[in-house]
Amino acid sequence: MTSEAFAMAQALRGQAIEWRRDFHRHPELLFDVDRTATRVAELLRDFGCDEVVTGIGRSGVVAVIRGRTAPASRTIGIRADMDALPILEATGLSYASAVSGRMHACGHDGHMAILLGAVNRLAKTRAFTGTLVAIFQPAEEGGGGAKVMAEDGLFERFGIEEVYALHNMPAMDIGTFAISEGVMLAAADRFDIKILGKGGHAAQPHETIDPIVVANHVVGALQTIVSRSVNPTDPVVLSVTSIHAGEAYNVIPPEVVLKGTARAFSDTNRDIVESRMRAIATSIAHAFGAEAEFDYRRGYPPTVNHPAQARILAAAAAHVAGDTAVRRDLAPLMLAEDFSYMLRARPGAFIFMGNGTTAPLHHPEYDFNDDALPHGISLWIDLVTRASK
Ligand SMILES: [Zn+2]
Ligand SMILES: [Zn+2]
């Protein structure tokens, strides 16, 4: 807690709280982050960044801060997400959302304030070698804003060689960090299965092909993918979360629609899950004389840290928070993050930062913990000095 970076970050705490609570009061969704992006760009210009570019990946904002040049100096990107969630806030805070049904329930308000704090400081001191590219990204919560920014040439245009991000984590102590040198988060895919049978009178089942019976077999057999088809050391979740069919007591409906999510830590397992699901759904349907339509849509890929960059980020965390405050062997979580797309474009790493005893992420009573701000700011200041060398 005595590092120089942490002392600098403490001095920025008051301002960072102000920025954070202003974002919190004005939550915006997906790519429609006009107010937030405008405010971010305005602050970045005030800080004296060398370049501030808006409209990258529709509504993303990018700032370039050049440090001292040295023969081996590098350009590193740090990403903060800007969007909120369609949740009705129930915190009762003085700075609670001013927009009913929208709220910063994932702490992206805090992530922005942290990156702004670090940029503010580094733009002033320039006490680092190389170049920092601060990336403010829209649409993390379902829109794949990271992918859209990457497709818009983010990495090439700004010459980004490595990329980093953090996410707050409730129930983890303030001032602690958790990371691993490999998989951090899962891929999140979605599926729809339509079982097409033949409806009819419930008293004459022999005249029908009952899709409800077929669907029951399909749901049961899908469970064998997790237990029999994937390697047990590389876990998968497959949840059927919705079944819709029928209206009446005495009518067999013509079709059943199933929906759900599949989560995996590797592309290998995503391939296995998709192909086994297709085989099970169509073959079981055929066995009963029905048909199955199967649609599998890939969402965010797994978030996988690159070992060298994870070690640099862990070293920065250990330097600002103390060695015992950094867990380096975090087991992967079944959550998903679109920063995964950035980690596919460039080497980099993602780290969790403690948010203390707050409500969980995406909960109506969640709030980013302002006490975490200096820890995040000092992490980025330390990382930039370390990684850009
Ligand atoms: Zn979220
Ligand atoms: Zn989030």
Image (cartoon, rainbow, N blue to C red):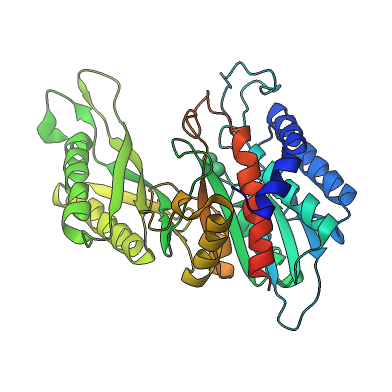
In the image, residue 345 lies at what x, y percent?
58, 69
| The residue positioned farthest toward the bottom in the image shown | 71
Can the viewer see residue 108 in this picture? no
**Taking 112 as reference, is 217 left or right?**
left
**Taking 71 as reference, is 380 left or right?**
left
Vertical position of residue 101 compared to residue 27: above or below: above
Residue at horizontal 71%, vertical 33%?
A: 17
Quadrant of res 180:
bottom left
**Taking 22 as reference, is 354 left or right?**
left
Residue at horizontal 30%, vertical 30%?
A: 245
In the image, residue 127 lies at what x, y percent?
78, 64
Can the viewer see residue 261 in this picture? yes
| The residue positioned farthest toward the front in the image shown | 2
Residue at horizontal 43%, vertical 46%?
A: 335
In the image, residue 277 lies at what x, y percent?
27, 54
- Count of numbered labels shown in the rendering: 0
In the image, residue 377 lies at what x, y percent?
67, 48
Quadrant of res 171:
top left
Residue at horizontal 55%, vertical 47%?
A: 167
Vertical position of residue 157 compared to residue 11: above or below: below
| On-image quarter of the C terminus | bottom right
Quadrant of res 319:
bottom right
Vertical position of residue 175 compared to residue 326: above or below: above
- Comparing 342 with 316, the one in front is 316
- Comparing 152 with 119, the one in front is 119
- Comparing 214 with 12, the one in front is 12
**Taking 129 as reference, is 299 left or right?**
left
> Ligand 2 falls in which quarter?
top right
